[in-house]
């Protein structure tokens, strides 16, 4: 048996256990934007829902900023040497917010019944699972059909939230009235949701970790306008602006205020990577030389420094540097307009216009598209911006009606969970913008992606992914832009807010306010 | 025709109009690109085709458009506005939740702007050409031309950030749990900036309309007759000019009153006011069909209702209208 738990448990214990210096009590006001569609994390897993419901629900594990697993509902775990059996020992004395006991049956129900039906992303990992059983009330065993290295990353709160069996078994999950008053095992309980205004969570007095949480209550405040969110922070109405709450150009101004702290940490698990899909099917973007020319034409460092105010990191390829098995041993596309012009001349580019579809997520993205158009025009590429709202963007990308389209996706710690889905040919399906939208087909590489996912040792996987990255970066199926970081802005008297790889999504658990 | 007969006749026509509006809205919203299943699935961050199909099936979007329309119309005939895909709650409930906040904001702005607008308009007309008239008309032009969005942000900057006199956003102090008079005062202090921002624009509109109308009426023969009779200027203005000049303002106010329920999207957004305007805007972005259609329908009903009310007010303000018909 291979034990992963020993060192991580010690680190986690140090992080989780109360220390004398930490002060209990107080209230935290956090911005949530947009207003979540619901708070039942098993049904909805978008960012705002996870931000709020991440305090209500829990999963078996948490992950530190190096993506090393830490205890959560599970106090310890073992993975068999053949990589096929995952055994979790659960914490004792855990209760649901309605007072019922939490047991292994809840885990089996959540993973095997509830989430299989409702959770698209987890379903992909569960395809590797042969059985999920509870040999005793405090033990859960996952048996896999074949080894699947990234499986250890599937026990994150947004990936496998554990839901109460006694409430959901045998019901219509999506329409269960209990969805309006979520019941979890987490450090905070749902108290009230005033639609359009705020969501109020209160301390779970029966939380199974002694002394936690420190805070008495958390208010998630709905403020729809980015400028108004900045003002709310300035006037002291809110204490925390989660990443992406304000426009980038407001960040330096807010960061300079007295008693304000900024951190870029807390995005290691999600590792959002932004790129432009380049339509591999038709138009100039179907030509590999054109795609390489686009990469050389762009001054991505300038874009990072100016459009993103210096936040983030220029991407080298499909895998973000904080995701496991990242390699930078690839062709580096620096800003080289001459090289871009050469490539365009070689392919015989005739000035056919290309449309750039920005991501309709605010001013920064619009400006990013403008910067790209400017760079492209400097090397003679005739580009125009084709703007749209969110629904229109979804429609155009899922129907492949674009030439170059901005997007970003989370990586979930492992290439097999959050990267390969955008590049393998079996994921070319019209009607969805979360697959191989660019239409890249490389069957030899597809086999390598599949093999790398099921290799047993990390060393084997590392070598396999290094080879994949080297090869795919030369093909330029998409134009990798930047590893995004969304800084969290908060008052410095709020301590231990961002301590894990999902940052503020489970931040209030350990956070405390220095009075 | 008596007022009662007018109301009955208008209401019966109104029902048919509403039905036509509902059907038109249905087609308009379905003509927009994108659908709620894709938007909702997209928010999950990693949806697959199976999830989109499941959502379409759950929302009934996999059925032919005429079937969806039939179900929708059958629903509204029974006063059922349907279910919000995105928020997982009945649309009527969502609208009812947001209605008080919207009405408070828009009615306050409406009443304030109507009173101030008419008062300033009459005052400016009485001093036409004089400096005070110039000041008032210039101010009106300024508030009419300034984008509401900018004005709102400036109001927040000055009164909340710099001076700290008034809360910059929200409906009430979150978590304060005030009751009774304290709560009224709390909501009142939150109301001032958004209501004033929204009200300034309409004050300008009413003022310009009242001033122009007063000047026009004051040139008519019956005013000369009144002067010849030896009535004082104040009496002529109040009894003769204002009463006639107010009709266009009533028309305009009636039209705008109908839109009150639709909310004020920009004001509600900047001030984080939890009203219907924001609900509509957010639902539109998410293509939450039933919610958008519900808000549109309620707004349309209000426009029709206030048109009827305007007609009745006409008859009271100017009895000649009733006599003619």
Image: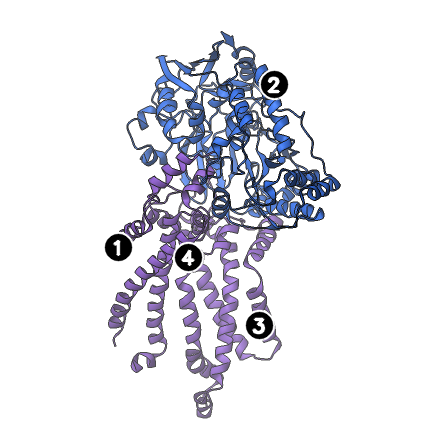
Chain letter for mark 2, please. A
Q: Which hue belongs to chain A?
A: blue
Tell me if residue A256 can be seen. Answer: no
- Is A366 or A95 nearer to us in this picture? A366
Q: Are marks 2 and 1 in contact (CB under 8 Å)?
A: no
Residue linked to disc 3 = B137
Mark toward the viewer: 2 or 1: 2
**Label 2 to label 4, Cα distance in Å?**
60 Å
Q: What colour denotes chain B?
A: purple
Answer whether labels 3 and 1 touch (C-beta < 8 Å): no
Which chain letter matches label 1?
Answer: B
Q: Secondary structure at mark 3?
A: helix
User: Are tags 2 and 4 found on a single chain?
Assistant: no
Q: Chain of mark 4?
A: B
Q: Earlier in the sequence, mark 3 or mark 4?
A: 3
Mark 4 = which residue? Answer: B262
């Amino acid at each position: 048996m291979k034990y992963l738990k020993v060192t991580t448990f010690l680190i986690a214990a140090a992080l989780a256990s109360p220390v004398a210096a930490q002060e209990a009590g107080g209230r935290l006001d956090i911005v949530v934007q947009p207003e979540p569609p619901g708070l039942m994390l098993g049904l909805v897993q978008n960012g705002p829902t996870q931000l709020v419901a991440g305090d209500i629900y829990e999963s078996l594990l948490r992950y530190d900023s190096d993506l090393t697993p830490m205890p959560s509902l599970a106090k310890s775990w073992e993975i068999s040497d053949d990589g096929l059996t995952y055994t979790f020992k659960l914490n004792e004395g855990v209760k649901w917010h309605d007072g019922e006991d939490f047991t292994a049956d809840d885990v089996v129900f959540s993973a095997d019944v509830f989430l299989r039906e409702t959770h698209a992303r987890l379903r992909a990992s569960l395809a590797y699972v042969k059985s999920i059983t509870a040999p005793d009330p405090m033990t859960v065993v996952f048996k896999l059909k074949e080894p699947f290295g990234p499986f250890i990353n599937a026990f994150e709160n947004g990936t496998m939230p554990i839901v109460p069996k006694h409430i959901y078994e045998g019901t219509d999950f999506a329409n269960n009235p209990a969805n309006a008053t979520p019941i979890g095992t987490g450090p905070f309980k749902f108290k009230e949701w005033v639609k359009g205004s705020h969501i109020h969570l209160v301390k779970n007095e029966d939380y199974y970790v002694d002394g936690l949480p420190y805070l008495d209550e958390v208010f998630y405040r709905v403020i729809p306008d980015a400028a108004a969110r900045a003002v709310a922070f300035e006037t002291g109405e809110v204490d925390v602006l989660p990443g992406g709450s304000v426009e980038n150009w407001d960040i330096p101004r807010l960061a300079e205020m007295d008693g304000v702290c900024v951190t870029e940490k807390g995005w290691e698990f999600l590792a959002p990577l932004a790129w432009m899909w380049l339509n591999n099917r038709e138009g100039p973007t179907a030509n590999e030389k054109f795609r390489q020319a686009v990469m050389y034409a762009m001054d991505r460092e300038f874009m990072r420094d100016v459009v993103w105010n210096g936040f983030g990191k220029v991407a080298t390829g499909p895998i973000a540097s904080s995701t496991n098995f990242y390699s930078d041993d690839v062709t580096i596309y620096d800003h080289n307009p001459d090289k871009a012009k050469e490539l365009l001349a070689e392919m015989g580019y005739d000035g056919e216009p290309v449309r750039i579809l920005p991501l309709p997520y605010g001013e920064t993205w619009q400006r990013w598209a403008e910067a790209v158009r400017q760079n492209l025009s400097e090397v003679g590429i005739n580009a125009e911006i084709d703007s749209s709202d969110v629904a229109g963007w979804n429609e155009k990308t899922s129907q492949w009606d674009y030439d170059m389209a901005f997007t970003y996706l989370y990586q979930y710690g492992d290439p097999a969970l959050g990267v390969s889905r955008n590049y393998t040919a079996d994921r070319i399906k019209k009607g969805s913008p979360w697959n191989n939208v660019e239409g890249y087909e490389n069957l030899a590489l597809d086999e390598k992606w599949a093999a790398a996912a099921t290799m047993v040792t990390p060393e084997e996987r590392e070598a396999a992914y290094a080879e994949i990255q080297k090869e795919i970066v030369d093909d330029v199926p998409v134009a990798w832009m930047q590893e995004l970081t969304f800084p969290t802005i908060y008052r410095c008297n709020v301590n231990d807010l961002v301590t894990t790889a999902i940052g503020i999504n489970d931040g209030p658990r350990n956070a405390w306010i220095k009075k | 025709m008596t007022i009662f007969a007018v109301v009955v006749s208008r209401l019966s026509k109104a029902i048919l109009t509403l039905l036509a509006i509902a059907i038109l809205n249905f087609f308009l919203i379905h003509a927009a690109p994108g659908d709620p299943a894709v938007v909702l699935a997209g928010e999950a961050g990693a949806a697959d085709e199976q999830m989109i199909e499941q959502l379409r099936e759950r929302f009934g979007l996999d059925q032919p458009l005429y079937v969806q329309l039939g179900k929708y119309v059958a629903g509204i005939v029974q006063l059922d506005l349907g279910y919000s895909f995105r928020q997982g709650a009945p649309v009527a409930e969502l609208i009812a939740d947001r209605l008080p906040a919207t009405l408070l904001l828009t009615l306050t702005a409406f009443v304030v702007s109507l009173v101030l607008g008419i008062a300033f308009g009459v005052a400016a007309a009485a001093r036409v050409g004089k400096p005070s008239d110039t000041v008032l008309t210039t101010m009106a032009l300024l508030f009419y031309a300034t984008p509401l969005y900018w004005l709102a942000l400036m109001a927040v900057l000055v009164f909340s950030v710099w001076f700290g006199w008034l809360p910059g956003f929200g409906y009430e102090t979150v978590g304060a749990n005030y009751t009774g008079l304290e709560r009224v005062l709390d909501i009142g202090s939150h109301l001032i900036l958004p209501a004033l921002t929204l009200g300034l624009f309409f004050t300008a509109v009413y003022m310009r309309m009242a001033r122009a109308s007063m000047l026009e009426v004051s040139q008519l023969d019956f005013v000369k007759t009144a002067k010849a009779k030896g009535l004082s200027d104040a009496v002529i203005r109040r009894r003769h000019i204002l009463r006639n000049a107010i009709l266009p303002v009533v028309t305009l106010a009636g039209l705008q009153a109908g839109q009150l329920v639709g909310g004020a999207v920009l004001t509600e957004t900047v001030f984080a006011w939890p009203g219907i305007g924001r609900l509509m805007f957010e639902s539109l972005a998410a293509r939450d069909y039933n919610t958008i259609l519900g808000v549109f329908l309620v707004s349309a009903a209000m426009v029709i209702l206030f048109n009827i009310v305007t007609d009745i007010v006409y008859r009271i303000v100017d009895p000649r209208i009733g006599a003619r018909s």
